[in-house]
Amino acid sequence: MTWLDIGALDDIPQRGARVVKTVQGCVAVFRTGDDRVFAMDDRCPHRGGPLSEGIVHGHAVTCPLHNWVFSLETGMAQGADEGAVATYPARVEGGRILIDAARLIRGRAA
């Protein structure tokens, strides 16, 4: 994998998010209360809500528009018939947040 450095872990508050703009669209990068990082598309498939503005709890985020809850690990909506958000491999190394650049370029992820 080719990793893209998008900033310092400390740039994102615990249980907060940051948006990274790409040619494929916006990616939300989340920091959990236990300092893990996750990245996923910033658009809820239900009504297009900005997930980066949602509430982070545990390893999930709640959409600010209609309260759909998404797993930060899988991108799957919890308790909804349909709905998933593309996720992107992310990690912290030396206090810096890295995202898999190849997946960002392709625009789809695991």
Image (tube, rainbow, N blue to C red):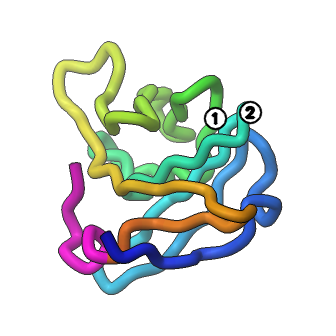
Q: Secondary structure at mark 2?
A: loop
Instruction: Residue 59: give x, y in percent of width and height.
Output: 55, 28
Instruction: Residue 69: give x, y in percent of width and height.
Output: 45, 26
Q: Amino acid at mark 1?
A: Val
Q: Mark 2 sits on what residue?
A: 33
Q: Amino acid at mark 2?
A: Gly
104 falls in the magenta region? yes
In the rendered structure, which segment of residues is drawn in magenta?
102-110
- Quadrant of the frame with the N terminus: bottom left
Q: Nearer the viewer, mark 2 or mark 1?
A: 2
Residue at the spot 43% in from the left edge and 73% down from the top edge? 3
| Disc sitting over residue 80 in the figure | none
Are discs 2 and 1 less than 8 Å apart at CB? yes
8 falls in the magenta region? no
Structural crowding at the residue carrying mark 2, measured as other residues with C-alpha within 10 Å and reported as few (<14), some (14–19) or many (≥20): some
State whether residue 70 is above or below residue 64. above
Q: Is residue 47 left or right of residue 8?
A: left
| Disc sitting over residue 56 in the figure | 1
Residue at the spot 64% in from the left edge and 35% down from the top edge? 55
Which quadrant of the structure image shows residue 33?
Answer: top right
Instruction: Residue 98: give x, y in percent of width and height.
Output: 53, 67
For the image, the number of numbered tags is 2
Frontmost residue, 97 versus 20: 97
State whether residue 47 is above or below residue 95. above
Q: Residue furthest bottom?
A: 23
Q: Is residue 106 left or right of residue 24?
A: left
Q: Secondary structure at mark 1?
A: strand
Residue at the spot 35% in from the left edge and 19% down from the top edge? 78
Of mark 2 and mark 1, the one earlier in the sequence is 2
Which quadrant of the structure image shows residue 101?
Answer: bottom left
State whether residue 104 is above or below residue 89. below
Frontmost residue, 79 versus 49: 79
